[in-house]
Amino acid sequence: MVDIRIKSVTLHHVKVPLKHPFNTHLQKVKERESILLEVTDTDGIIGVGECVAFASPWYTEETVDTAWNTLEKWIIPSMLNQSFSHPDHLESALNAIKGNHMAKAAVNHAFWDLYTKKLNKPLWQVIGGIKETIEAGVVVAAATDFEMKEEIDAAVEKGYKRIKIKISQNTNPKDMKSIIAKYPQTLFFADANGAFTESTINQLRAFDDCGFALIEQPFSEQINRISAEAQKTMKTPFALDESIASYEDALDMIERKSGKIIVMKQGRVGGLSAALRIHNQCIQAEVPIWVGGMIEFGVSKAFNLAFASLPGVTFPGDFSSSSHFWEDDLAFPLIDICEGSIRLSSSPGVGVEWNQSIVQQFEVRNKLFK
Ligand code: OSB
Ligand code: MG
């Protein structure tokens, strides 16, 4: 049994330009602001984490500033100089703090890394992973139809087995159908980020025979009731992203049938501990999971990859190479795609570290708590 006493926590606020703007109907992301974490125990072992909240509240309510504030005022004081024998115990200690899932997930991750380093085992093995290679998938979020077609051609060329296309009410389903027909070997997902409403269900239905393997988050998370109604009338399964912020939300989706597949983002549900509970529930209910991305750096991606090795994860996730978004990733080793797949690390812990010199280049502020 390990007993981990937390000695210090360091936060780094960074701002890094994306190679190309990431366009959704909600937001154009040109640079990524994030909070990077290091949690050090009394033996000097360091666990790493990454908070995936964005600079503005376009995807969830949390932002970099709200997460920093919650970490500084509430989360870090609840863990400093405390001992925990398992990441789930740290999670329980934070139950008195409501919401703030992305801030909590970042410390939950850092503690899982520390914990599995102490066990001297790769994280993915400790959580029950069964796959050593993970299928790569990429997201096309282009500004124009022309760019979208170019990016899809390039993604197929690079060997991605799955391509996710951002759609909205302005997307033409006929165009989608012809693009998908061009690449019968590639799996296509659509992600609407909640673009459809009760009054535009018919526009959504027009995507039903495009050949998409699934449609991600057709409606906003406020109208899961409408999602359930629409799902009854469409053959393409819905995969819910924004709607799943907790274990209870996953149960709700399964019961209501507002979707048939879960998109796992550990930051959105509060961390790996919470994500594992949802995974076990999905195995029981025979509901497939896949792992969504957040335009992240290598640390968050490594936690996603470890999760993707679990038996309940049955569709390829948002796993592009480090060079897809970044000129220089802030973490190492970098993610490489080899024949459409990514090999998991055999190092203890999550298997990646912050690249301190690159972090320094992009740092806006930092703070050490001890
Ligand atoms: O809706 O899945 C989403 C990125 C940021 C915020 C929300 C989403 C996304 C993506 C995945 O589509 C991008 C990636 O590969 O990291
Ligand atoms: Mg999504």
Image (tube, grey):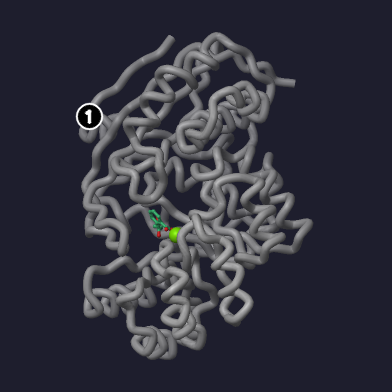
Mark 1 close to ligand 1, CB under 8 Å: no
Residue 365 occupies quadrant: top left
The answer to whether residue 173 is above or below residue 282 is: below
- Residue found farthest to the right: 284
Q: Position of residue 25 (x, y in %)?
A: 31, 64
> Residue, x 22% and y 59% (percent of image)?
20
Residue 291 occupies quadrant: bottom right
Residue 8 horizontal side relative to residue 263, left or right: left
Name the residue nearer the viewer: 130 or 284.
284
Name the residue nearer the viewer: 208 or 228.
228
User: Which type of secondary structure does the marked residue at label 1 adopt?
Assistant: strand
Residue under label 1: 364
The answer to whether residue 21 is above or below residue 238 is: above
Name the residue nearer the viewer: 310 or 13.
13
The answer to whether residue 239 is above or below residue 34 is: below
The amino acid type of the residue labelled 1 equals Val
Question: From this viewpoint, is residue 92 visible?
Answer: yes
| Number of numbered tags placed on the structure image | 1
